[in-house]
Image: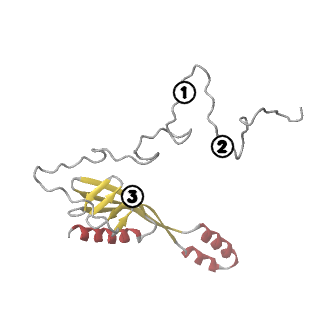
Amino acid sequence: MTEPYPQTGASNQWGPGQPPSAPTQPPGIPPHPQSGPGYGYPAQPAGGPGYGYPAPVPQGYGFPQQQAAPGAPAAPGPMGGATLLAIGDIAVTGDQIITPAGQLPLRGAVWNATDMSHTEERIPPHAIVLAVVFFLFCLLGLFFLLMKEKRTTGYIQVTVTSAGRHHSTMLPAHGPGTFPAIMAQINYARSLSSM
């Protein structure tokens, strides 16, 4: 025994560089049909979409579908194109409003914004420490108490209503100028909706 694992014949060779061979089927068990490119892949229907490909959205999913009157022309398809405006998760394109819940027509949309933020002004802790330290040396340390810091917390709620559907989003307020900036975007969206 000069080899640790003696093998007889070339058919028992395996390892890198060797083509995979079909496993032998034990007696009494019917053979398994090969249904994919290899083991580990789910069976795919011929001509169907690949594994993990998103299926088409079923009819009636999401908001209630609007039925066109008999004999009326079909609603125009999405115009596409570049995004003119984005407010949170609401995007405005040429003739539609795109939200995570679906598309809304741009014409006649009603836009609202509610400021639910507040700004507080306080003396920072380091100013109090400096005032105490310098008060002991000279009375000029009291000027450190004039330091103020403003902190804005809260959200701004933006809502859009169009064709009987409604979508709302919350945007964080980073400073006192956040609400006027969002109102400027809302006014631009209102002007697009009135065209």
Q: Which residue, given by chain and number where applicable, does mark 3 sit on?
A: 170
**Residue 102: image location, x then y, percent:** 31, 54
Nearer the observer, 21 or 46: 21
Q: Which residue, given by chain and number where applicable, does mark 1 sit on?
A: 31
The image quadrant that residue 132 belongs to is: bottom right
Amino acid bearing label 2: Pro
Q: Any mark on residue 182, and which?
A: none
Q: Nearer the viewer, mark 3 or mark 2?
A: 2
The image quadrant that residue 115 belongs to is: bottom left
**Residue 143: image location, x then y, percent:** 58, 78
Element at label 1: loop
Residue positioned 64% across, 40% down in the render: 20
Nearer the observer, 61 or 166: 61
Amino acid bearing label 1: Pro
Residue positioned 73% across, 35% down in the render: 12
Q: Which residue, given by chain and number where applicable, does mark 2 sit on?
A: 19
**Residue 126: image location, x then y, percent:** 62, 69
Q: Nearer the viewer, mark 1 or mark 3?
A: 1
Nearer the observer, 13 or 185: 13
Q: Would you call the spot at circle 3 few (<14 residues within 10 Å), some (14-19), or many (20 or more)?
A: some
Relative to 99, is 51 above or below? above
Q: CA distance from mark 1 to mark 3?
A: 58 Å
Q: Nearer the N terminus, badge 2 or badge 1?
A: 2
125 relative position to 110: left or right: right
Amino acid bearing label 3: Met
Residue positioned 64% across, 37% down in the render: 21
Q: Would you call the spot at circle 2 few (<14 residues within 10 Å), some (14-19), or many (20 or more)?
A: few
Q: Would you call the spot at circle 1 few (<14 residues within 10 Å), some (14-19), or many (20 or more)?
A: few
Nearer the observer, 172 or 189: 189
**Residue 151: image location, x then y, percent:** 49, 66
Q: CA distance from mark 2 to mark 1?
A: 21 Å
Q: Nearer the N terminus, badge 1 or badge 3?
A: 1
